[in-house]
Image (cartoon, rainbow, N blue to C red):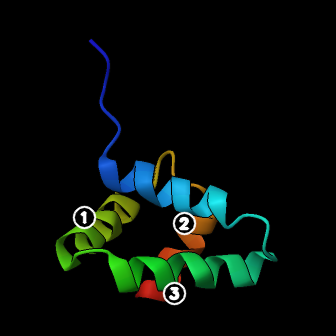
Amino acid sequence: MTATVPPERRMANDIAVNLGHLPEESAAEAVAGHIARFWDPRMRSRLLAYADGGADGLHPLVIAAVRLLR
């Protein structure tokens, strides 16, 4: 049986990869901005909870973005 990747992790990582061409600080701000503007509050909450639980598999830019979202 294969474990499923939480959709918030998958989507946040996809955003980070797409914005990875920017300088690191700008990219983290852009990821955080995208999540703040376009994600439902429940999705943001699940991403923050996932990050609190160890952040396994989260792109480093997503981890930086989560810090900015707090």
Q: Residue at 69% of width from left, 76% of height from top?
A: 27
> Which of the pair 63/44 is nearer the observer?
44
Q: Secondary structure at mark 2?
A: helix
Instruction: Name the quadrant containing residue 25.
Output: bottom right
Mark seen at residue 46: 1
Q: Secondary structure at mark 1?
A: helix
- Which residue has dot 2 on it? 62
Amino acid type of the residue tagged 2 in the rendering: Val
Q: Locate residue 6 relative to residue 10 in the image: left or right.
A: left
Please tell me how crowded label 3 is: few (under 14), some (14-19), or many (20+) other residues with Cα within 10 Å.
few
- Say which label, 2 or 3, has the lower sequence index: 2
CA gap between label 2 and label 3 equals: 10 Å
CA gap between label 3 and label 1 equals: 16 Å
Quick check: 7 above or below 30? above
- Callouts 3 and 1 close, C-beta under 8 Å: no
Residue 10 in percent (x, y) is at 43, 48
Please tell me how crowded label 1 is: few (under 14), some (14-19), or many (20+) other residues with Cα within 10 Å.
some
- Which residue has dot 3 on it? 68
Residue 43 in percent (x, y) is at 24, 67
Q: Locate residue 21 relative to residue 52 in the image: left or right.
A: right
